[in-house]
Amino acid sequence: MPTVADIRAANETITMLTAYDAPTAELVERAGIDVILVGDSMGNAVLGHDSTLPVTIEEVASRTAAVSRVTDEALVVADMPFLSFGVDEAESIENAGRMVKEAGADAVKLESGPHTVGLTERLVELGIPVMAHLGLTPQRVNQIGGYGRQGTTREAAAEIVDLARAHEEAGAFSLVLEHVPANLAAGITEALDVPTIGIGAGPDCDGQVLVITDVIGLGDWSPPFSKQFGDVRGEIESAVGKYKEAVESGEFPAEEHSETVEEIDDVY
Ligand code: KIV
């Protein structure tokens, strides 16, 4: 299994994908993906919400546990949901600790800002590796007013650079950069020792991450910076349609799907 130290020192491009359940995690790991993020993107991707805000600590813990149970090669990172961190330090530590102690995560990810520098330092001190996350931080959707690109002015870009440095100094082992200009991501990647992992941040990060439902083509929408590499939605529609037809026509279940027991023939 790649450790946090391996990711920190990676020479090769880091591959990261989200997964929210055991069968998907198993396949993602089998494909050789380095890091599995149990992202709070589960809110939109699989829980039917229209943002990540309603996702609870229990939901992330339960799905992290499912992913951890079936993986040993990939590094499993649990995403800390909205308001599960940053309000009260003791509670933040307890919540992050649950992900490691109960759910089997190897590290946690925090949507970062000025308020997470001290918390990152404290978690790292306590032995909980932290992946930072800057640029578009979807938990701030109500403040930002949407999911637009971040760091597009000199001032905003400089703030992201400062925060990236501050989180590296605080001990974060890697940094997700979401939906920022490619040249900003390239500059931050050059400036930091820890690896950057981009999503909508151009080709020059040390690694890339996408949401699994976008990659496999399960969702009905995906962001413009993502890419669909498969058509699982089409496969499910086709399989479910075939099942319905087979049941309605009496073709399923066939003889090979049924068993009879002679001894009970005269019971009624
Ligand atoms: O929740 C998530 O899946 C994420 C990634 C998009 C980085 O934060």
Image (tube, helix red, strand yellow):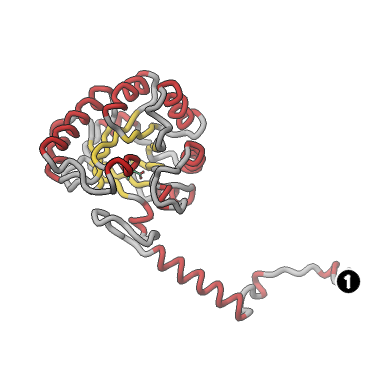
188 horizontally vs 134: left or right: left
Q: Residue at x 51, y 38 (%)?
A: 58
Residue 14: image x %, image y %?
A: 27, 42
Viewer-nearest residue: 202 or 47: 47
**Quarter containing the N terminus:** top left
Q: Residue at x 40, y 63 (%)?
A: 232
165 horizontally vs 88: left or right: left
Is residue 78 shown to the viewer in this render? no
| Residue 254 in which image quadrant | bottom right
125 horizontally vs 48: left or right: left
Residue 132: image x %, image y %?
A: 29, 33
Is residue 230 shown to the viewer in this render? yes
Instruction: Give above or below for 107 relative to 208.
Output: above
Instruction: Give above or below for 253 relative to 204.
Output: below
87 horizontally vs 199: left or right: right
**Amino acid residing under circle 1:** Tyr
**Quarter containing the C terminus:** bottom right
| Crowd tier of the residue under label 1, counting other residues whose Cα lies within 10 Å: few below 14, some 14–19, many 20 or above | few
Quadrant in which ligand 1 is drawn: top left
| Residue 217 in which image quadrant | bottom left
Q: Residue at x 23, y 31 (%)?
A: 194
Viewer-nearest residue: 264 or 37: 37
Viewer-nearest residue: 50 or 80: 50
Residue found at the very far bottom of the displayed protein = 249
- The residue carrying mark 1 is 268
Give the total of numbered labels.
1
Residue 7: image x %, image y %?
A: 29, 34
